[in-house]
Amino acid sequence: MKVKVKARIKRPEAEEIPIVTEYIKLDSFLKLSNAAESGGIAKSVIADGFVRVNGEVCTQRGRKLRPGDTVELDGAAYRVVTEEK
């Protein structure tokens, strides 16, 4: 008898990064969250496929992120949230 085992990938706890607008572009979010030191680095890591958005690799630096989206890069996770006033 074969037994199927589902492996669960443990995701890192996401740091919440507040935004004041309806959305933010992925490259700008990486700079805002300090995941990338500059726009050039953000562009490079996105183009090279090192960034995951909601668990899937994303190579679109202009991708619009909205509250609730999660971004992962280099073992760290960041969640977009609405800034409380």
Image (cartoon, grey):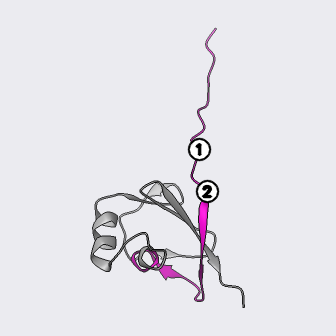
Placement of the C terminus among the 4 image quadrants? bottom right
Q: In this view, does 57 lie above or below 22?
A: above
Q: Quadrant location of residue 43?
A: bottom left
Q: Is residue 73 above or below residue 67?
A: above
Please name the amino acid that badge 2 sits on: Glu
Label 1 crowding class (10 Å Cα cut-off): few <14, some 14-19, many 20+?
Answer: few
Which of 53/11 is in front?
11
Q: Distance between the Cα atoms at labels 2 and 1?
A: 9 Å
Q: Where is residue 60 in the image (x, y as percent from the top left)?
A: 37, 69
Residue 3 shown in magenta:
yes
| Residue at the outermost right position | 85
Residue 75 lies left or right of residue 84; in this view the side is left
In percent of the image, x 62 and y 25: which residue is there? Answer: 5
Q: Where is residue 15 in the image (x, y as percent from the top left)?
A: 59, 66
Q: What label does residue 10 carry, if any?
A: 1
Q: Where is residue 10 in the image (x, y as percent from the top left)?
A: 59, 44
Asked if marks 2 and 1 touch (Cβ < 8 Å), the reply is no
Please name the amino acid that badge 1 sits on: Lys
In percent of the image, x 43 and y 69: which residue is there? Answer: 35
Give the magenta range: 1-29
Residue 47 lies left or right of residue 9; in this view the side is left
Label 2 crowding class (10 Å Cα cut-off): few <14, some 14-19, many 20+?
Answer: few
| Residue at the outermost top position | 1
Residue 42 shown in magenta:
no
Q: Position of residue 37 (x, y in %)?
A: 35, 75
Q: What label does residue 85 carry, if any?
A: none
Placement of the N terminus among the 4 image quadrants? top right
Q: What label does residue 13 carry, if any?
A: 2
User: Dot 2 lies on which element?
Assistant: loop
